[in-house]
Amino acid sequence: MADAPKTDSSKATKTAKTQASRGGAPKVDASKGEASKEEASKGEAPKENVSNGDAAMEEPLGSEAPEGESVDKTSSPAQADEDATAQADAGNQSEEDDSSETEEDHSLYKFLEKWQSTCLLEHQLTFTEAVESLSPKSKKRLVEARAGTGKRSSTWTLFDTRTNQEAVLVHTAIWRSNTSFETGNFAPEGQKPPIHVSNQRIQRAPGFKCEITYTIDTTTEDSFYTNLQILEEYIQTVKGFNRENRERSPWQDGTHRDTYNLTSKLFVMTSLNPREPAFQPHEWLTNVVKGQKKAEYAINPRRPSYFDMVDKKAVKLEKSKPPRYCAGDIIWFSFKVSFYVGNQYWSSDLTPVEFVRVARGIKFGLNNPEDDDEDEEGNKKRSLEDGSAISIIERNPFEDHNTQKRKHHETTDDDKPKSSNGSETADDENSASGEGTDVSIKEEAEVTEVALPPPSNNAKSDANDPQPPPKKKGKKSKN
């Protein structure tokens, strides 16, 4: 057995409670979304291992899944002593605001900590207890890394020492974004991904770069990175791992702890003899697999399951409201861990098994209620994108909003900007977003001033009121 890493496991148990002094959990910006993997090239050979097992949560969670805690808002010392202080009214108001935000912070961290310590099935381990068992002070290790054989000899997988099976770890985090649960970053020639994917990440042919990406937010609470760091320190002490002393891949190495991307492969090698998927694959996937001249890739049957917790039961996400995960939602998830040694780097690989939404982000001010009213994923977003044509909408704050009309700057054909391929950009209100066409943005600017009502005849004119332009004096008639 490998020597235990000299790592202080107390790091794994530290939560972000100390960050509560920030005065409120920051709202999640979904636009940041998925980081481009091209920025930190892995330099690895294609991975041929796909973690086994996709435990389907067909049974309701029942008593195994504790109901989400209510927010515990206790009075802060500043509020308790408010009557005894002689501060100005403005100062007291500031204290109340700060204490309210701090309470919200505490409740968020308390909720995250509870669910990070929760397993929904007997064979699962929490991420924290798994890494804590690697400490020299621990009586028994709950997990250990084992080398693969044959084509998987360069892959080390984390096993549960209790069951002698691949370890299934669980954790809870704040959701940031995801690519399409059906097609990920894959889109065949002539098709556009249903959710925005950067051009450099779009894949047109089946391969190991075709994947679904799930991005969690680790800005507010980064225990996920802390646990992963301990796990990676452990694997480097395992005898036989990384014999060539290759460096750790810079991709998600913990240098920047804003987000973490988990991925699920869309395709696997046919040489692995994959079974038929239990789900209905998207037609893009089935068509591209059937169209291969040589049957090299098959659809990956081990796709994660997506649930929402409703009344202590696991409800399929598509039957829930909203039928998707929104930025800021609190998501419990299970995953498997492996470590891969490539030609240039070694890296850790986390394969998700299940996702369960245990609370809406609105509970902690992390997203908005209008998210429920949004259409299904894939519809045009109400935001600017790179290369969008600009349609100017003028606003006059003094006009009646009920009768106000949009005013567009008229442009001639010579004035219209050209795209890189020489085609004209769309500037028509009814134009639709499609492959190779520019989008005409119809976002309405906010009006920060209210329309003034017409002044009454008896009202006295105020010096600050807007005055009508003076009338021109005409010549008086001599008659």
Image (cartoon, grey):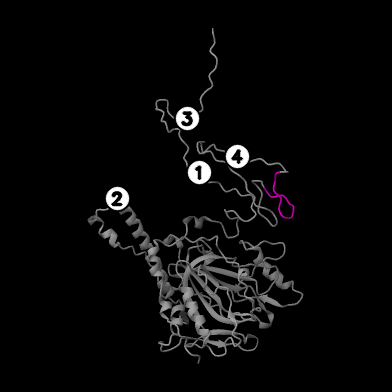
Q: What are the residue bounds of the magenta stretch?
A: 415-426
Mark 1 crowd level (few <14, some 14–19, many ≥20, 10 Å Cα): few
* Residue 86 placement (x, y as % from top left): 24, 53
**Looking at numbered disc 4 in the image, what kind of residue is underneath it?**
Lys
Q: Which mark is drawn over residue 378?
A: none
Q: Which residue is mark 3?
A: 467
**Which residue is located at x 43 percent, y 85 percent?**
135
Mark 3 crowd level (few <14, some 14–19, many ≥20, 10 Å Cα): few
Secondary structure under the numbered disc 4 in the rendered image? loop
Q: Which residue is mark 4?
A: 407
Asked if 319 appears above or below 413 in the picture, the reply is below
**Looking at numbered disc 2 in the image, what kind of residue is underneath it?**
Asp
Per the model, the C-alpha gap separating discs 1 and 3 is 21 Å
Residue 273 lies left or right of residue 144; in this view the side is: right
From the viewer's perspective, is the residue at label 1 or at label 3 nearer?
3
Q: Quadrant of residue 406?
A: top right
Per the model, the C-alpha gap separating discs 2 and 3 is 38 Å
Q: Which mark is drawn over residue 447?
A: 1
Per the model, the C-alpha gap separating discs 4 and 2 is 46 Å
Q: Which residue is mark 2?
A: 89
Please report whichever mark, 4 or 2, sits nearer to the chain's N-terminal start: 2
